Image (cartoon, grey):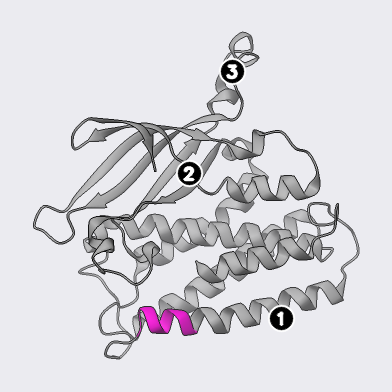
Amino acid sequence: MKTVFIFLLFISNLQSQDSLLTDTSKINYYKLSIVGGATLGGFIYGQAFQKNLWWKGEKSSFHFNWKEDWAYALGADKFGHFFFPMLATNIYADAFVWSGIEKERSLLYGGITALTYQSFTEIKDGFSKQWGFSWGDFSANVFGAAYPFLQYKYPQLKNFNMKISFFPSERFKHGSNKVIFDDYESTYHWLSISIANYLPEEIRKYYPSFLNVAVGHTVKGFDTNSRHREIYFALDLNTQELPGNSSFLKFIKKYLNFYHFPMPAVKVYPDVVWYGLKY
């Protein structure tokens, strides 16, 4: 994740006023080489970071993780394996467009690039005695990398977007994990729905288009015998509908929209709790 955001900032700094979000018909190989160099650097850094985070344990022959695949984290890790390739695909697609590749091909190449990295990581998990190759993780990676392309081909899917948010859990505060996104109790995944596009016209013209609804999921009780899921309903901020139409602001609003900002919410499972603001 850290590598993804570093690359995002890198591409943001490279963009000109209008070039990043505009398709062109001529590939700029100088720009493409910059993308390639940044990718290589990000790959090396990411692998070193993940080795320090996950792959320090005992090695083994390649094996599949059948037993723990869905029991581990109660499946919450699958949301992350969907989210991060989806984010990376968007970043790479914008980088390829900036390099002069047309939009549809950029999304395709971006998805392939994101999935290649995730697949390499999953294969390395297969040689870790602790982890093993997970078909569930791999499948989520495939769907996440493909989703931006599917949204382009089927625009109705743009009304359904996966988001993420973080709030430090007690176990994280006591040192359970080195980084917050590795602690599933601190991580919340949200499906944000642009309901404004589904309202009748007479209501839609009065409804704020930046206000979505979202369904959220997290897991709790990892250090006890009462591990359980939590489900939320919340309002959600669609930052892409906020004012500002310059290319730079559109770029910023697009990537802010991958994060669920604190909004009123209600937990509906396993009990009901109302929140004035839920992080």
Q: Residues within 10 Å of mark 2 (few under 14, many from 20)?
A: many
Residue type, mark 3 in image? Tyr
Which residue lies most toward the right here? 26
Residue picked out by circle 1: 37
- Magenta residues span 48-55
User: Where does the C terminus fall, quadrant-wise?
Assistant: top left
Q: Which of pointers 3 and 1 lies earlier in the amino acid sequence?
A: 1
| Residue 237 in the image, given as x and y percentages of width and height | 54, 35
Residue picked out by circle 2: 260
Q: Residue at x 58, y 45 (%)?
A: 257
Residue type, mark 1 in image? Gly
Element assignment for label 1: helix
Between the residue at mark 3 and the residue at mark 1, the CA separation in whole angstroms equals: 45 Å
Between the residue at mark 2 and the residue at mark 1, the CA separation in whole angstroms equals: 31 Å
Q: Which of pointers 3 and 2 lies earlier in the amino acid sequence?
A: 3
Determine which quarter of the picture holds residue 53.
bottom left
Determine which quarter of the picture holds residue 271.
top left
Residue picked out by circle 3: 207
Q: Is residue 264 left or right of residue 236?
A: left
Front-most of residues 140 and 44: 44
Q: Which of pointers 2 and 1 lies earlier in the amino acid sequence?
A: 1
Residue type, mark 2 in image? His
Q: Residue at x 66, y 45 (%)?
A: 253
| Residue 232 in the image, given as x and y percentages of width and height | 32, 36
| Residue 56 in the image, given as x and y percentages of width and height | 33, 87
